[in-house]
Image (cartoon, rainbow, N blue to C red):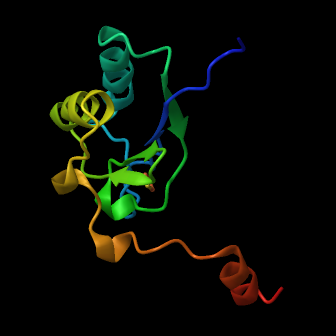
Amino acid sequence: MGIPQPAFYIFKCEQSSPPGMPKPSCVNEQTRDLFAHLSQIIMQKGLIATVHPVRTACLNRCQQGPVMLIEPGHYMYVNLTKEKITRIIDEHIIGGKVIREYLIADEFWDEPLSVEEAMKMAGR
Ligand code: FES
């Protein structure tokens, strides 16, 4: 038997912007320990062998930050707090039940653009 794949990847945006920048970012004084919290919860629950947390740069939904994307499934959770992250691990990852009220609104997360459409828009 080979090395098993993770069942989940959790991409947590870790982008911060310098003080005074008008653009919001996912990491500031109040939110900078969310990735540590996510990692701790994954460890505490005994999930580290199959749930892989990943720090990412901007996921392009800054207005809804802090955000994290769970794969598989393309689930974008927004306006995160420690309490929400704990509940997402308990209910989505362990319980298998997506928490709809924490997901990004449909208007900001429409169907994926196809490769063909993207190339056409880019003039290729
Ligand atoms: S800074 Fe996090 S989505 Fe852009």
- So how many labels did they put on this image? 0
* The N terminus sits in image quarter: top right
Picture coordinates of residue 11, whole percent (x, y): 48, 40
- Residue 18 x/y as whole percent: 45, 48
In this view, 123 is above or below 39: below
State left or right for residue 81 relative to residue 114: left
Q: Is residue 91 above or below residue 73?
A: above
**Residue 100 as seen in the image, left or right of residue 78:** left
Q: Quadrant of residue 85?
A: top left
Q: Residue at x 62, y 19 (%)?
A: 4
Residue at the image point whose x is 16% and y is 32% from the top: 83
* 84 left or right of 45 in image: left
Looking at this view, is 74 or 2 the one in front? 2
In front of the other: 28 or 102: 102
- Does residue 41 sit above or below 76 in this rendering? above
Image quarter for ligand 1 equals: bottom left
Q: What residue appears at the point 41 percent right and 59 percent down from the top-left corner? A: 21
Residue at far right of view: 124
Percent x, y for residue 23?
40, 63
